[in-house]
Image (spheres, rainbow, N blue to C red):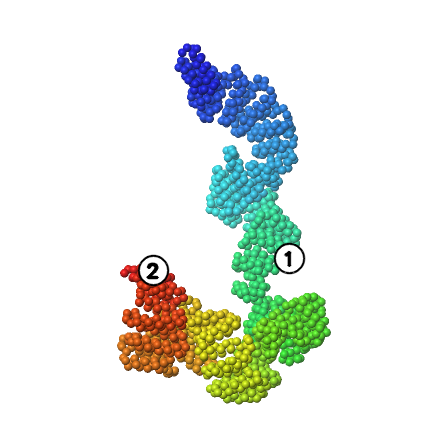
Amino acid sequence: MSNKEVKAALKSAREAIRNKDYKDALKHCKAVLKLEKNNYNAWVFIGVAASEMDQPDQAQTAYRKAAELEPEQLLAWQGLASLYEKSDQPAFKEELPEIYQKLLKLYESNDKQKWCEVSRKLADVYHQERKYDELARAWHKLIKVRQEEGAGDEELHELWKKMTKLLSDNAEEQDNEIQELLVIAFENALSTSKIIPSDEHQKLYSEFISFLSKLPHKKSRLQRACEAMTADYPSELFPQEALSLYFIQSGCSSSEAKLCYSRLHEIDPKSGPGNIGLGICAFYDKKYEESAKSLAQGLKQNISCTVAWYYLAQAQLKMHKYEDAIRACNQALKLSTRKDMHESDNRQRNIALQLKAEALVGSGRADYVEEAIQTLDQLPDVLNDPLLLALKCRAHLNKMQYDVAFKLTAKLLTSHSEKGEAYAVKGLLCYSQKKYDEAEESFQSALQRKPDTADYYFYLGLIYWFMGEETRRDKSKALTHFLKAAKLDPYMGRAFYYLGQYYRDVSLDKSRARGCYKKAFELDGSDGEAGAAAVDLSMELEDMDTALTMLTSVIENGRAGTTKWAWLRRGLYNLRINQHSQAVVDLQAALRADPKDSICWECLGEAYLSRGGYTTALKSFIKASELNPGSIYSMYKIAAIKQAVGKYKEAVAEYQLILTRVKEYVPAVKGLGECYLMLARNAIVDHLDKTAADCLEQSLDFFTRAVKHRPDVSCLWKLLGDSCTTAEAISPGNVNVSVPGLLFGQVEKDQKQKLDKFELLKLGGRCYGRAIKLSSSSNLWCDVGINYYHQAQHLSVYGCSNETSELLEKSLQCLKKAVMMDSGNHQYWNALGVVANCKGIGNHALAQHSFIKSIQAEQNNTVAWTNLGVLYLQEGNVELAHEAFKVAQSLEPSYVNCWIGQALIAESVGSYETMDLFRHTTELGMHTEGAKGYGHWVCATLQDKTNKNSELYRYNILQMNAISAAHVALSKYTERIQNDATAFTMLGFLNEYLNLKIQASEAYHRAVTLLKNAGDQERLNFASRNYGRALCAIGQYDRAINAYMSTTLSEFDGICGLALAYYKKGLFKDSIKAYEKALSLTTSEQEKAHVLTALAIIEYKQNKLDNARTLLFKCSMLKEPNIESLQALCTLGLAKRDVTLSSAALNELLKHLKKGDCVYEKCLLSCALFSLQGRNITAQRQASKAVHSNPGDPVLWTLLSRVVPHCAPQKSKGGAVAGQVAQNLNFNHAKALLYSGVNHLAMGRHFSQHKYNNSLKMVQRAALLFPDDPAVWSGLIAACHTETSACYLTGKKPKHTGLESALATAVTTNVETAKDLPATYIQAFKSWSLWQAITASKQTGKMSNTEALCTKALKSHPNDSLLLLKKQIHCEQLLQSGKPLSGSMLEELKKAVKSNFSSVSAWHWLAEIYKTQDMMAAAEMCYRQSLQVASQQGSLSGKLSSLLRLAQLALTVCMAKVRSDHWPALVQEATNEALKISSCPLALLFQALLQFIQKIGARDTRRMLERVVYQPEYPETVTSVARWYLLRHLHFKNDYELLDVLLKNAKANGDTKVLELHKELSAA
């Protein structure tokens, strides 16, 4: 190809590139290169096409080839530059600066504009690659070229400005040349700025100053720049702050720096750099407080200024504020570990570590030792630096590691003997070990080397202080050195503290001592000892304002949980000025600081106590005692608080505990006496006089012990007098108090003397007199006056008029003396009025005056108003008395005496409210007058038989429970007033109403005894009749007869009572005579009917039934028939089994009864009559009807529970419920539990069926409530026998055997000791219990024992039943031996049974004997005979038992496969009859078993067996048998589904026999 063709191909390639047909372009270029291998343009075009086709490697190769061919040509280099600029390949980016350098050379001479463009690009690349040296040179050359070309100032300004931006990153890390170029750039940029001032110019200046501040060697330029900017922008803080920060970082404190700091502070007082700079200057001027304050203020704005933290730490260290210094050092260390810090900052970090170590060691805290040692270990060359080595030694000393400290000290002395620190450390070591002489020598050596060290002087002062008393008092020793230490280091708080100690303890200059303590505390706010001492001295100097101000300041500035001493002292101060609530708050704050301070808890307890918070105070003192168990004070306060809140018994225990530690601690002894005195007073209020006397004796013992140790204390003698005088309220018969001989001046002071009431009161008067001699006061004169009054009142009972008058006069004079000494005390006036009004003086005018003066002295004076009312009532002025009592009631509604006054007024005017008022007095509290008044009104209301159905009676007596309330009141009254026969009579009357027979007889006997000497025969006769009646009620008939015989026997009631006593005694003839005499004295037909009824009962007792009936008929013929006589007539008919007589009497009785009268008696007689007629179901229904009509009457429920097992045993479940309802309605009807247990027996419920609700449990509960009732024990025998029988039936071993015999013995004993039981009843009990014991013994197989019991029984109770039983035992012994019974034996047994023809069980037994001899027909006849007997007797249980036994006999024969239609028919007949009586599960079982025998695989078989198995209420003994046969049926039918159901049922009921059978059948 020719040259033309080459040019044409290149042209075509250029056109293709222009048309973006790069492949075609490559084709043309390759064609050219075939001809001209080194064609420059072809390679360039290939590079362009490849670059556009995104083939950078091919493009680079082409451009490089072209550049190699013609290096001075631009196209290839421009192409490479363009390629590299577009590409992201790192290799291309690395080569780009080289390409730009080549282009710059090519452009430099011919194209300046292109050169500048490339220079900019090159600078950008250098900036991206952080090649600041090349960047600076390239940009500086660019600016120089533009200057040479005459560029304008604006362009040059932008270039200089751009240069500052490009080089500002990490400029301080560049070399000096670059930094100098940047400085030139900033200066030129600033000088070429057109608008000055402007935001851009100001910003540029700020950046320039910020840059210069990072260059330590540009100080002058920085200063000039700051001054220039300040000149242009005078209000701008930045240049001053920058210059200040520069000075700060350089540690400069020159006058120039100070001027800068001051100027900045003037412009902005809150400026961080300004305050920091001033702080540094103040530090160098030794103004440490000012320095710390300024530095702290500056660091709020510049918290990252490390230098400021260093200086702050040093300032605080100089002021001994170690905690603050540690925090400052930690902050400095935190900042020094930042990533942007230089290695040159290690020096500052080491300084911070050293400062921190000094602070940690200087604090002296043992918990800082480890941290201090770790801090020192971080410093280089610790062991060779004497200062650091001394610090380490001091750290070990703080932790009392003397061995380590000794080694370090020895090393320090060896290597640095010229240093004062070495000797100082040795001195500290010796001081710590209390080697004061060596320590003194060491510190003196240290002072020789460093004479101006305050610490050395301070420690020398400490050594002299603790060396001994002589050196402590020597002014040239301790005082001088403390003063020198304080002078050299005015911030050393401990030096001022010990100066305070010296002035306080040695010089006794409290004012100067307080100043030193105050100075010490001002220097070190954490020094609680100094602060506390300053406050304590201020209080001693009575400068309370200063003390309070100081405490308040400490508390307000202190942190939470600190400054305990301040809170404690302010709390005590507030407690002192009675600011109790604030004291509590302060003391609680003190405890938050130290919860284990027992003293704080005690103070808090006092604060709570002062404001009346006894509970919280008690808790506080308990806590204090727990923290300090040896604190007697805490224990005493606990006891005192319990005493204050009325917990006297607990207080006694606490006081006793104190005395076990401090035997004669007088406050505890006194407290014990006070507690027993208060217990005595409480007992007196409750009318427990004997208890009160015992407590008074105890209190006298303890008060005497206290007086023995402190006879000079007046209050102890007063308390002795109070104890003696308290006995005035106790009945004289209960006062027989043992008093220590010390009170009588006996030589043997431990000896005691018994005193009665009067002697005790006299002793109280002498004790008051002793107290008055020690300290005469108005209250003591009042006490002694009251004591004399009580002595006089006691003597007045015995008629000692002369002594009484003398004592009353003394009492009056003493009370006048008390009034003269304190005329404003209302209690003294009231006591004077009472004494003046008493019977012996009777000065009513003085009494009235005194009561009025008492009221004037105290307006709310209930007692004085009441006494004034009593005075008016005595004078007969009812209206004024009523008004006085009315005022007293309005003032204090719970004061009982004013209500008694109103009751007496109501009684005097005949008001119907009298009884209500007296009752109210007993509700308010016990008072003898109120108790007797209420008792009188209750007895009077009870004796009034005309109003029994009135609304007033129901309210006053029934609704208000008056009888019980009056009984309690009169019981307390007679305990206190033991010479009031009327009260004892009323008490006996109420006891009779409450059925308290013995108590009634005792009360009546007391009344008789009191009246025998009174000379009032009428009252004595009345009391004797009452006494006889009560004796008769408790069975003491002889004494009752004597009581009645002691009367005149002229009244109807007395004669009837005597007749009753004769009757009870069994003297029927005497009783008849008495009743006949009484009959002649009757005044009404009712009385006559009663006497005739009583005579009829006596005739009945003598078996003269016709006479009894005649007498009762006479009663019924009266105009007003008596209900009791008709009841007796009906009962007589029932006893004679005379249905006609009983029915007639009952019908007559029902005519005269109103609805609701005699409900129980009517029901009982009706049920008995129906039962006699054989209408058992009707009898049960009658009882049920009565219960439905009166569901709240427990007696009727009890009767129903009693009737059911006799008349309707099939309803025994209901009978059991009825018994429980009766017991729930009234606990006193607990005998209903016995009837409930009998019902459980009738329904066959035993322990295995119900764990809690069974016959044994019920009867056991009844036995607990009625242990003296033989019927209960008989029921218990039956229940035990049932449980034993149930165990035998289920194959279980009985828990207890032989109980029946023991219980039978108990029954016999109970019956023999019981009273009022008929002989037949006793005989029946004995026979039945013995029979049960024999049956139980027989059941257990103890035949010899059983035979012995029978022989014993035959001796005492011979009868056919026992003979038969004995033969049964003999027969069973023969059967057990295996010998056959002969015909004669069988005939003999049959005769024995026939002799007991009415015994169903005998026929059953004979049938069983026939069964053993295979005589089934004979056995059937026996069962039929028993069925006939049971039918005749109307015994459903006997019939049911006979039918079931007959069915069992027939079933046994059927199971033996005997072919006969008779036996299956007999099974069916007997079971059907049994089911007619009750739904008996055993009958259903027999029917199912019969079906099983006849048709084992029939569906009816399964159905009948399932009916028994799955019935939940059936006994387990029955269901277990049915389950066994059902299992066999299901196996026979291979019914696996129903088998699973049956097996689950067996497992649920614990039927192991069925499960075992299932295994056997499955295996077969």
| C-alpha span from label 2 to label 1 | 90 Å
Left or right, 1384 with reference to 872: left
Q: Is mark 2 on a helix, strand or loop?
A: helix
Q: How crowded is mark 1: few (under 14 residues within 10 Å), some or many (20 or more)?
A: some
Q: Where is residue 1056 in the image (x, y as percent from the top left)?
A: 55, 85
Q: What residue type is labelled 2?
A: Leu
Image point (60%, 52%), residue name: 567
Q: x, y percentage for residue 768?
A: 63, 71
Q: Name the residue under label 2.
A: 1539
Asked whether residue 829 appears in the rendered view, the answer is: no
Identify the residue at horizontal 59%, vertical 33% (top origin): 245
Looking at the image, which is closer to me, 876 or 486?
Answer: 876
Whether residues under marks 2 and 1 lie with C-beta atoms below 8 angstroms apart, the answer is: no
* For residue 1223, side relative to residue 605 (left or right): left
Vertical order, 216 against 1453 (above or below): above
Q: Nearer the viewer, residue 1410 or 13?
A: 1410
What amino acid is found at the position of numbered circle 1 in the picture?
Answer: Asn
Residue 1199 lies, with reference to residue 245, above or below; the image says: below
Image coords of residue 919 (percent x, y): 61, 72
The N terminus - image quarter? top left
Provide the secondary structure element on which disc 1 rests. Answer: loop
Disc assigned to residue 612: none
Identify the residue under disc 1.
578
Q: Where is residue 1047 in the image (x, y as percent from the top left)?
A: 57, 86
